[in-house]
Image (cartoon, grey):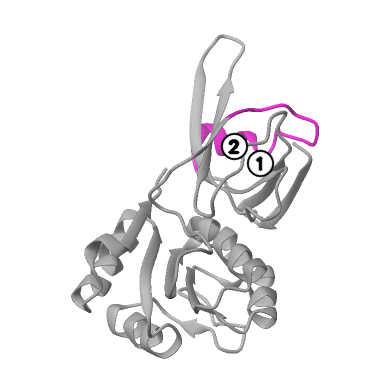
């Protein structure tokens, strides 16, 4: 571990510098394995938030989960210099690359925005010609993961639109929405900001994914172009 800091009260930014770096694509993840002195092992997958165009390190956003064996370690025990066993990068389904044409919609809830931070960074670095619409749902203003950086990327990148929905708080940022994303609202934003959507990525809890992924298929986007990733405890 070469860097460790708080992104929100419940999410830490952890940066690894592996002994052997392997290139990755935006949306991929790595597996972290912790082994106790008695041999007990706990393993957890985390999406990479850094951009593939900035190689050498893997950056993660690790949320503290109640009873989470791996996340608890990174919120109280881990420190700069700690050596961790990792595997990957992994995953070939939930990825976005600059070579992919057209507009893209990213829809995440809570720490489910993690792979989209990588995608937004890569989209900006590549000066991609298509539009990217990033919709992010958070409980409160202080729970927004990566909010400042994503807002800065959207200011720098005219083809990146970043909109947040705050579900249990009054939004503090101009352009943010109050309440939850629903099908009608999400599709209206897509028609406005990513009308030529060639792909959709949805990442969040089971309930979030189940509620919203089908909206895009119902709107006429091929089911194989709607990629989903779920996370849980």
Q: Which residue is mark 2?
A: 72
User: Would you say residue 120 is visible in this rendering?
Assistant: yes
Depth order, front residue of 170/207? 207
Packing grade of label 1 (10 A; few <14, some 14-19, many >=20) is some
Q: Is residue 131 left or right of residue 92?
A: right
Tell me: residue 84, above or below residue 219. above
Q: Position of residue 176 (x, y in %)?
A: 54, 84
What is the magenta range? 66-86
Tell me: residue 224, above or below residue 24. below
Identify the image quadrant of the C terminus: top left
Q: Are marks 1 and 2 in contact (CB under 8 Å)?
A: yes
Packing grade of label 2 (10 A; few <14, some 14-19, many >=20) is some
Task: Name which quarter of the figure residue 215 lies in.
Answer: bottom left
Labels in figure, total? 2
Q: Residue at x 49, y 61 (%)?
A: 110
- Helix, strand or loop at mark 1: loop
Q: Is residue 196 left or right of residue 140?
A: left
Q: Which residue is mark 1?
A: 75
Q: Position of residue 164 (x, y in %)?
A: 52, 77
Q: Position of residue 16 (x, y in %)?
A: 70, 39
Tell me: residue 191, above or below residue 200. below
Gap between marks 1 and 2 measured at Cα: 5 Å
Tell me: residue 13, above or below residue 147. above
Task: Name which quarter of the figure residue 152 lies in.
Answer: bottom right
What's the mark number on residue 35? none
């Amino acid at each position: 571990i070469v860097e460790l800091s708080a992104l929100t009260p419940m999410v830490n930014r952890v940066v690894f510098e592996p002994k052997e770096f392997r290139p990755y694509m935006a949306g991929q993840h790595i597996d972290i394995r912790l082994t106790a002195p008695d041999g007990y092992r706990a393993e957890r997958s985390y999406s990479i938030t850094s951009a593939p165009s900035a190689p050498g390190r893997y950056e993660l956003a690790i949320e503290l989960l109640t009873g989470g064996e791996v996340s608890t370690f990174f919120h109280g025990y881990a420190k700069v210099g700690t050596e961790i066993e990792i595997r990957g990068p992994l995953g070939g389904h939930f990825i976005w690359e600059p070579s992919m044409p057209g507009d893209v919609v990213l829809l995440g809830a809570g720490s489910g925005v993690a792979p989209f931070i990588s995608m937004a960074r890569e989209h900006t670095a590549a000066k991609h010609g298509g539009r990217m619409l990033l919709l992010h749902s958070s409980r409160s203003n202080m729970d927004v993961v990566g909010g400042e950086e994503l807002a800065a990327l959207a200011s720098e990148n005219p083809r990146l639109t970043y909109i947040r929905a705050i579900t249990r708080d009054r939004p503090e940022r101009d352009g943010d929405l109050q309440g939850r994303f629903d099908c009608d609202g999400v599709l209206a934003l897509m028609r406005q900001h990513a009308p030529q959507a060639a792909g959709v990525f949805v990442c969040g809890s089971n309930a979030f994914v189940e509620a919203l992924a089908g909206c895009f298929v119902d709107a006429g986007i091929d089911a194989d172009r709607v990629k989903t990733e779920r996370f849980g405890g």
